[in-house]
Image (cartoon, grey):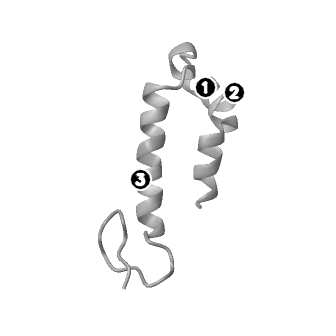
Amino acid sequence: MAKCKICGKAVVTTNVFHHECWQEEAEKLAQVFCDDYCRWPRECPNQDELEDKHCDSCDLIRVLNLGL
């Protein structure tokens, strides 16, 4: 039986990772990207404005919100 590439537990479907594990890893990666590479958090001091103008239209955030 295949094992999850992230947590190592058995996977009963054809995927080699659990959806929850994938979501957790993707969110960690997004946090690193947003904190270290995205320019908008440094240029936009207002959190609400940042989310409305930039985060809501970010491709990475949109993909994560799809729950793939």
Q: Amino acid at mark 2?
A: Lys
What residue sits right under mark 1 in the picture?
Answer: 50
Residue under the image location 43 percent in, 85 percent down: 12
Q: Earlier in the sequence, mark 3 or mark 1?
A: 3
- Residue 15, placed above or below residue 67: below
Residue 5 rendering spot, x and y as whole percentages: 36, 65
The dot on residue 53 is 2
Residue 6 lies in quadrant = bottom left
Q: Is residue 47 left or right of residue 59?
A: left
The image shows residue 63 at horizontal and vertical percentages of: 63, 50
For the residues bearing labels 3 and 2, Cβ distance under 8 angstroms = no
- Quarter placement of the N terminus: bottom left
Give the Cα distance between marks 3 and 2: 25 Å
Of badges 3 and 2, the one in the foreground is 3
> Few, some or many C-alpha atoms within 10 Å of disc 3 (few <14, some 14-19, many ≥20)?
few
x%, y% of residue 68?
A: 59, 61
C-alpha distance separating marks 3 and 1 = 23 Å
Q: Are marks 2 and 1 in contact (CB under 8 Å)?
A: yes
Residue for point 45% across, 60% down: 22
Q: Secondary structure at mark 2?
A: helix
Q: Which residue is mark 3?
A: 25
Amino acid type for the residue under numbered disc 3: Glu
User: Alpha-carbon neighbours of circle 2 within 10 Å: few (<14), some, or many (≥20)?
Assistant: few
Image: 24 above or below 12: above
Q: Secondary structure at mark 1?
A: helix
Left or right: 63, with 2 as reference point: right
Query: Which residue is rendered at x = 41% and y = 53% of the image?
Result: 25
Q: Earlier in the sequence, mark 3 or mark 2?
A: 3
Q: Amino acid at mark 1?
A: Leu
Give the side of residue 56 with respect to residue 42, left or right: right
